[in-house]
Image: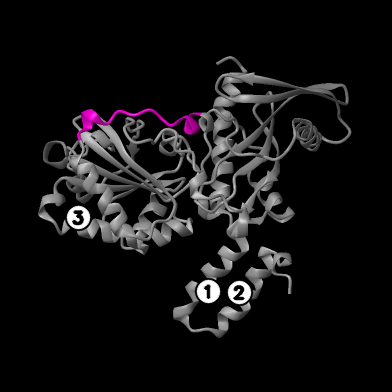
Amino acid sequence: MNMKKITPTVLMLISRFFIKKIPTAVKTVAIVAVVLFAQGGECRAASDADMSKLQPGMPLPQLLIQQDISREQRDYLGLRSGFMGMFAAKEFEPADVAADVLVIEFFNIHCMSCQRQAPVMNEVFKRVNAREALRGRVRFFGIGVGNTEIEADMFMRRYSVGFPLFADPGFENYDAIGEPGATPLTIIVKKNGKDLRIVSAHAGLERRADFFMAKIRIALGSDPTALVAKPPEKQQEKASLKPRIDLNMSEAAIEKRVLVSMHKAIGDDAVIEKVIKKTYPRSGDIYVAVADQYGLAIQLYAQVVSRPPTCDVCHGVHFILVFDSYGMLRYFEPLHLTKYGNVKWSTYDADSMRRRIIGLDVRYPLNYDPAVDSVTMATMTSSLILNSVQRLQDVFSEINGQ
């Protein structure tokens, strides 16, 4: 049998049949093996992550945690609690944490590698807390990329995580570190007052607790004033690539897909004379066209969105969003989207997302509930799409000179 011709979908179906025949203790291992085999050489490796903002010696990018913080979390992090616990701020920055070294874990509840690294980080946390010389100097917290507070809390309880986990549903903190395209992502920082310097940043699954313990010891012994570095030339070159993920499509092919999407957005009976591309400082390339439908002129805009994945074994996310001058989202067209096992989206999956987002007014905030709004087996991809729709609010404002 030629195993290369077996598709990921077929492999998943085979696994579901045989998984019933094997003991419970073996099931998890079998599922993981099938998924990794199905992904094959197409997976994005953690080594491909864009770490240009996270080089040793660089200042930690500006992060801000905004959510309700429990008393236990506040006490552990050494945050100010206000008068008798009242009037405590519902946000904090890493510089507010009382520690010499910070261990910041970026994760996603749906990322398999994050799930597998959780016990490793629990062991690291346990070892640090078992040593009096380390306990008060090293603090841990996690940030759930694209996750809600409920999801972050669910991850904490499901994997018995001993340190605080916080939500980043709008990807603000993930964007701040350069949207690297890989979780788990472990950043170890040396803190000197308000000056926070990166000592190490590791993307992807790491199974050895000793690996992180060694990094923590290096951080504790480092001189923060001596931690000054420039990103390597290769990283600088990589950071300049736009988009950072190769879509493997020519400009002519992309323009053709944009034109087709605009026709689907307005109707095949409409006449679209010409599509031009304009570049905006914040929004990048936006395709603009005027459609004539029954003598009525309609201004259309299209954005080709390319986003890096939020896990270390996932594909990049590529799709087209079409909206009009009134702010209505008129069409959504996948270019390359995958779900669990890196299986490509089906027509049904794309139609499910269209039903969710077509007709939305991009001028207003979007409420995203992953439990309701996600395409089945594609929660991480769905969150990136919905977040990109949310970002159209700023795109629309820039187009209109606001």
The correct choice, above or below, for 275 with respect to 124 in the image is above
- Which stretch did the figure color magenta? 223-236
Amino acid identity at mark 3 = Val
Q: Position of residue 401 (x, y in %)?
A: 58, 14
- Image quadrant holding the N terminus, namely bottom right
Taking 299 as reference, is 84 left or right?
left
- Examine the structure image and report whether residue 226 is included in the region drawn in magenta: yes
Report the residue marked by disc 3.
Answer: 128
Towards the viewer: 315 or 226: 226
Which residue is rendered at x = 24% and y = 56% of the image? Answer: 125
Report the residue marked by disc 1.
Answer: 30
The correct choice, above or below, for 49 with respect to 228 in the image is below
Q: Position of residue 161 (x, y in %)?
A: 30, 59
Which residue is rendered at x = 18% and y = 30% of the image? Answer: 193
Q: Which one is in front in this view, the residue at disc 3 or the one at disc 2?
A: 3
Which residue is rendered at x = 57% and y = 48% of the image? Answer: 381
Q: Is the Cβ of the residue at disc 1 closer than 8 Å to that at disc 3?
A: no
Which comes before the other along the chain, label 1 or label 2?
2
Residue 376 in sight from this viewpoint: no
Mark 2: few, some, or many residues within 10 Å (few <14, many ≥20)?
some
Amino acid identity at mark 1 = Ala
Mark 3: few, some, or many residues within 10 Å (few <14, many ≥20)?
many
